[in-house]
Image (cartoon, rainbow, N blue to C red):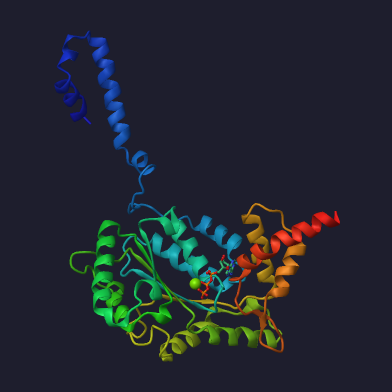
Amino acid sequence: MPRAPALLWLLLPGLAALEPLSVGIAIGAASALTGYLSYPSFYCSYVECCPGDGHRLNATALRAQLDARLFGQHLAKEVVLKAVAGFSRNRSPKKPLALSLHGWGGTGKNLLSQIIAEHLHPAGLRSKFVHLFLATLHFPHEHQVKLYQEQLQKWIQGNVSACPHSVFIFDEMDKLHPGLIDAIKPFLDYYEQVNGVSYRKAIFIFLSNAGANLINKVALDFWRSGKQREEIQLKDLEPVLSVGVFNNKNSGLWHSSLIDRNLIDYFVPFLPLEHKHVKMCIRAEMISRGHAVNEKVVEVVMDEMTFFPKEEKIYSDKGCKTVQAKLNFHWDTVMRDTKAEG
Ligand SMILES: Nc1ncnc2c1ncn2[C@@H]1O[C@H](COP(=O)(O)OP(=O)(O)OP(=O)(O)O)[C@@H](O)[C@H]1O
Ligand SMILES: [Mg+2]
């Protein structure tokens, strides 16, 4: 940092008139200050910075968060930990990481994407390096697909140029126009560079309900044959899922060659949630609102949830999705009744 004191000297000619000890101290202080200010960790504690190449994801912390916040999804946890931690350890990946999350509504796909994002960029979904696209919100008009394609490609290119570790989450993949999937495809492939930009350190996460019925069927078959949910293994689902999704014209992945070119690295299945998982969601929601867990409220909310199939009623129709709204609705009433009884 020799330039800073020299500059100071030029700017402050009056310094020459001061006695040498004060000048020395002033120069020392200025050097220390400029050095400190230009130190990346100081700067990055105020302004969000793209992680450097040496940055590694903390897999232990990610595992702890998944265990604490994502209920009943042993397969999704296992796959994501392996995929994301492995990818982050790899100094020169051959392609960006592409995860495809599948499952019934309200089973934790957005929650898991949020947890992954938070571990790659501390600001999570608010990070300028994490980009969430909703098919129906961001690309609503079919006749504007050409324009969307251009905008999307420019957006991805610009953001990966600015930060190679960018994360792109595409929600409602089942509703995304096939033309847009084709627009993303070149970025997912095994190219060293596309137009001078390398995409190999980026992460793409696709969310959809495609394949949910197939996953639910496997889970139900396990249940009916008296096996534990945790006994379901990836190999029981992965082939069914990729073939099933591939053959489903409405899946959003069908038209593209994402699958037959092996551009999706991992299919991540989400199992339908059982009674006990929904109860865990209700309790977690109370705690996150700063309340003590109240089992009476848990029961009232549970009474309003509906379960399928018709005969056995094992899995929640809406996963944990309506828990927050139902809790808002019942909390005051139950608390008032409890106080009155007390
Ligand atoms: N497995 C789970 N563990 C803990 N909380 C969950 C789980 N699944 C869902 N939730 C909670 O339920 C709400 C809805 O979940 P989320 O948005 O992740 O569902 P989703 O799978 O994306 O559903 P959809 O397919 O309908 O978009 C969130 O508040 C989330 O915290
Ligand atoms: Mg969702």
Q: Residue at x 19, y 23 (%)?
A: 8
In the picture provided, is 64 more to the left or to the right than 30?
A: right
Q: How many marks?
A: 0
Residue at 29% over, 32% down: 35
Residue 107, percent across and down?
A: 57, 73
340 with respect to 99 (left or right)? right
Whether residue 311 is visible to the viewer of this picture, yes or no, is: yes
In percent of the image, x 69 and y 68: which residue is there?
279
Q: Quadrant of residue 23?
A: top left
| The residue positioned farthest toward the right in the image shown | 341
| Viewer-closest of 81 and 211 | 211
Residue 312: quadrant of the picture = bottom right
Residue 93, image x and y in percent? 33, 66
* Residue 327 percent across, percent down from the top left: 66, 64
- The quarter in which the N terminus is drawn is top left
Most foreground residue, 115 or 95:
115
Horizontal placement of 269 versus 152: left or right?
Answer: right
Q: Is residue 93 above or below residue 336?
A: below
Where is residue 257 drawn, in percent x and y?
A: 32, 84
Can you tell which quarter of the image residue 130 is in? Answer: bottom left
**Which residue is at a point 31% across and 82% down the rendered structure image?**
142
Residue 120 in sight here:
no
